[in-house]
Amino acid sequence: MAKSDTPTTDVETGDGTTAPRVGYVGLDHHHAEPYLQTLETLPATVTCACEPNDAFDAESVTSLGDVPVYGDLETMLADAALDAVFVTLSNRDTPTAIERALEHGVDVYTEKPAARTAAELEPLLDLESRTDATVCVSYPWQDHPIATQLKSHLDRGFFGDLRGFEARFVASQLDYRDTDHYIFDADASRGGILQWLGIHWIQLLSWLLDSPIERVNASMAAEFDGVGVEDGATLQLETAAGALGTFHCGYYLREGMYDTQLNLYGSGGRSSWDPMGRTFGFDGETSLELESTDGDWSATPARTITHEYEPEPGYGGAWGQEFVQQFFEARDAGTEPPVTLEDALTVLRILDAAYESAETDRWVEVET
């Protein structure tokens, strides 16, 4: 089902170098349009695409442009000379797509979580290690300027002994969402709000905390008629160092609304941050509140750092662009991308424990 018969060719950038040739895999996805907008801002060229769902209209993806659209990934990889693929398929189909790309020596940028379970993702680590390919998993929130500020404060010991943390990711109700899409299908996705939205904060906490999450106790609810995945979840989390945390997520609000929070509490300091704001977007501003018992902070123990957004297109705006740019830089330098398959495996192991806990009504150890 080709949109165009135009062959893929190398594309030169303004400085005479050749931009990476990218194939986009999975147009029937909520993030396809913003990712394509991000790619338009970078020295990379989308030369073809693949959409396995014949019923999906590729013409509806306005940022794709006039490029060939294939019906299956294997044909695209065989026909098109590619340096990388961007993958936004279902959690069920993503591991096979990554495997095919790696077998063809093509680098991969994939939507999170990259698989339904840790067991589905784990074999890809061995395959990646036997190739020269680079795989980056899309968890760009760790590149947010406030997140990097938090990481810097944690690394410098601002919080002292981290004692507790709390996170929240509440979004609009399923009445306002396309529940016929595969992201709400249990076989295609494994989970609901936790695996689709809540996972961002699970990954961010795993990256921020200097001690791994070791145990999980979870409760979940699936209250929306016709949807077999959870629309609400509450987790208790414990790190190996003994810090205790809670995380709540759910589809509860009116259309277009969000309620998010990420707070840290230590023996020496605390922080409070609303990453999302009331409506999803990457404009306006966001603030990090800090408070310390340290003597150097005695004159002004409570301080606020405000980040103002410069409007930029694409997923995550400017900091989303920087995250994707790090993927291309890593593939050029042969270094690790900002989020690796191993990092993604850590997140999936926490989710595995959460879903098992919800089924068994007990605390579950996170696999190491």
Image (cartoon, rainbow, N blue to C red):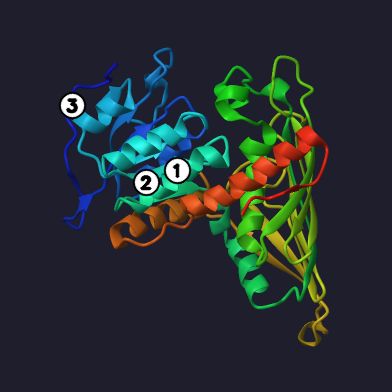
Residue 192 lies, with reference to residue 331, above or below; the image says above
Name the residue type under label 3. Answer: Thr
Q: For residue 123, which numbered disc appears in the image?
A: 1
Picture quadrant of residue 6: top left
Identify whether 221 is placed above or below 143: above
Q: Rounded to the nearest whole Å, what is the CA distance between mark 1 and mark 3?
A: 36 Å
Disc nearest the viewer among 2 and 3:
2
Contact check, label 1 and label 2, Cβ < 8 Å: yes
Q: Quadrant of residue 327?
A: bottom left
Write down the quadrant of residue 60 in the picture.
Answer: top left
Indicate left or right for 63 with 43 as reference: right
Indicate left or right for 315 with 102 as reference: right
> Which type of secondary structure does the marked residue at label 1 adopt?
helix
Return the residue nearer the eye: 181 or 134: 134
Q: Report the quarter where the C terminus lies.
A: bottom right
The residue carrying mark 2 is: 127
